[in-house]
Each structure stands twice: as C-alpha cells, then as structure tokens.
Amino acid sequence: MNLKIYKQGQGKNSRLWTAMVLLVIVAAGCWRLHLKLQAQDNVWLETLVPALICAVFAAVIYWVSNLPPVADFLIAAEGEIKKVSWSSRKEIANSTMIVITVVAILATGIGLVDLGFQIFFRQVVNLY
C-alpha cells in the first residue's frame, strides 16, 4: 500500500472535500452502529467496533483518493470547475424569479384544469 500523496498540491480542494464528505457519511453510519450496539450493555463493543470501522474506512478513503486514476479524475474535475464562468448574483435572482413565476402560472393552470375535470365528472357523469 503506497501512502505517498499522488501529484501533491494538484486538485487539493476536490480531493479534500471528496474525502471529507465520504468520511462524514462513514462517521454517520458508525454513529448509527454505535447507537444500535448500546443495547448490548458492553461499553467496549459499542465504542471500539464503530471506531475501528471508521478508522478502517478513513484509511481506505485516503488510499483510494491517492490512486492515480481517481486522483487524476479529481484533478481534472477541479480544473474544469475553475474554467466555469459563474453567473452574477443579479442574473441568478432574475432567473430564480422567472422560474418561480412560470411554476406558479403552470400550477394555477393545472389546478384550473383539475377543477374543470372535477366539475365535469360531478355534473355530467354523476360519479360523486
């Protein structure tokens, strides 16, 4: 097992945040396991098993994030994100208002069509 950091300094943010998110997911699972094992009334079992599992997964996450194919992908992904031209705050606010307005208009239209079908089936077909 190679513990050397592959292409150190490149893709630092994407590797760091990917590993941190994976570790949070593993830690949440280990916490749930800890809570499940509390019914056993064995402090060593309920504490050491989740801690050992969390430590093993942390080592695996570190190892996998430094594998050349994974590290190269994360480095390339961070490079592509740096190339993105992000919208301004004003453009995002305008786009959001347009989306909210269109959704409200469509919801109103669908609600009116539904109301029309209800009236039709009540009056004409007498299902209710």
Image (cartoon, rainbow, N blue to C red):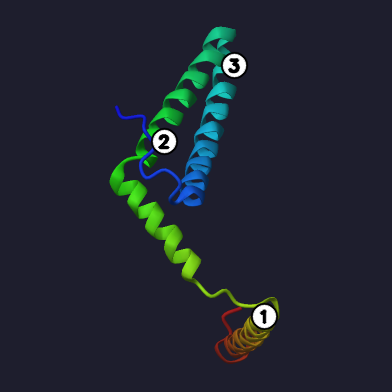
Identify the element where label 3 is drawn.
helix
Q: Badge 3 local density, few (<14 within 10 Å), some, or many (20+)?
A: few
Whichever of labels 1 and 2 marks the residue nearer the N terminus, that label is 2
**Residue occupying image coordinates x 51% and y 50%:** 13
Q: Which residue is mark 3?
A: 38
Identify the element where label 1 is drawn.
helix
Observer able to see residue 24: yes
Alpha carbon distance from label 1 to label 2: 40 Å
Position of residue 38 relative to residue 90, above or below, is above
**Mark linked to residue 100:** 1
Q: Which residue is mark 2?
A: 61
Is residue 68 left or right of 44 when viewed as pictured?
left
Alpha carbon distance from label 3 to label 2: 27 Å
Q: Badge 1 local density, few (<14 within 10 Å), some, or many (20+)?
A: few
**Mark linked to residue 68:** none
Instruction: Name the amino acid type tagged 3.
Output: Gln
- Whether residues under marks 3 and 2 lie with C-beta atoms below 8 angstroms apart, the answer is no
Position of residue 48 relative to residue 100, above or below, is above
Position of residue 42 relative to residue 54, above or below, is above
Whichever of labels 3 and 2 marks the residue nearer the N terminus, that label is 3
Give percent across and percent down for residue 45. 52, 11
Position of residue 100 relative to residue 3, above or below, is below
**Residue occupying image coordinates x 31% and y 30%:** 2
